[in-house]
Amino acid sequence: MKVAYLGPHGTFSEEAAHRYFKDEHIDWHICDSVPEVLEAVGDGLADWGIAPIENAIEGTINMTVDSLLVNDLYIAGEVILPVSLHLLGTEGTKEEDIQEVWSIPPALAQCREYIRSLKVKTRHFDSTASAAEAIREAGRNDVAAVASAYAGDLFGLVKVRRNIEESYENQTRFVVVTKDKKAPADAKKTMLQVIPSDEYTGVLSSILNVFSALNVNLTWIESRPTKKKLGAYQFFLEAGYGVQNPLIDKAVAVLQTYGHEVNILGSFSATKLD
């Protein structure tokens, strides 16, 4: 079995992938971007892919949503990974000696108050893992990286300061995708794409009222441009029932009666990692 995920080594995506897929005979396919992960599955280079779709602080990761459609993939699983950020340095690094902190902009933003208290410069990298690796390669005690404990262990760094993020409820949600459009028997959620028949006042409200009338809870709602014209949007809805539930069929049937295009993008259950 081949599994694609976003690299390089030490990323949160790698941690999520390695903790979710536990088969000893997995052939890992490391990609340079989220679209490449989903393209690898779509093109048959990997059997499965795992990609971040939402962060509790940063919100929806739009490139994942868009790439799902382009590659005609099916969401068969969900992984929720707690995100803890630490200040990592080489052995002997002291907090008071740090002059510069390295990481990706979102991670730095999630630790803004702490970094501001250090009164240091920041330097941007393309991943928390590459920042951590650069600290190891630099071998200096006046720089540090904001990254995960997983990355720190991988690159042999020490935690100069633990849990420097401002929100201790930070989590990232990953979707597990495949080309096989078969829902797990125990699926608890269904992801749908709804393309309105026309743009008119209250169109989103009318769509949501269908689920409300059926007493179907929606756990996630996102809008994305149809890319056909300015102001034209499609909606992504996550319903709190698996696709095997008759209420999902009813909701789809009613929406289609109204002339809306409805596509089921996946049905799955959540796996929460500690």
Image (cartoon, rainbow, N blue to C red):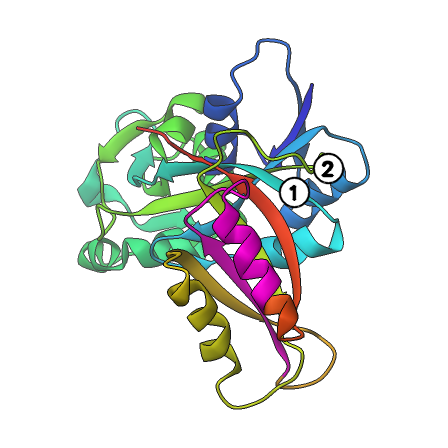
Q: Does residue 273 show up?
A: yes
Residue at image x 34%, y 29%?
149
Range shown magenta:
232-254
Tell me if residue 63 comes above or below residue 161 in the rendering.
below
Amino acid at dot 1: Tyr
* Corner quadrant of residue 80: top left
Please state the total of marks drawn on the protein image: 2
The single residue placed furthest to the right in the displayed view is 43
* Corner quadrant of residue 59: bottom left
Q: Secondary structure at mark 1?
A: strand
The residue wearing badge 1 is: 74
Q: Secondary structure at mark 2?
A: loop
Tell me if residue 198 comes above or below residue 265 in the rendering.
below
Nearer to me, 249 or 157: 249
Residue 45: % across, % down: 79, 31
Mark identifier at residue 179: 2
Residue at image x 31%, y 41%?
85
Residue 264 falls inside the magenta stretch: no
Q: Which image quarter holds the C terminus? A: top left
Residue 240: % across, % down: 41, 49
Nearer to me, 61 or 215: 215
Residue 196: % across, % down: 63, 75
The single residue placed furthest to the top in the displayed view is 24
Amino acid at dot 2: Lys
Q: Sort mark 1 into few (<14), some (14-19) or many (20+) by Cα contacts within 10 Å.
A: many
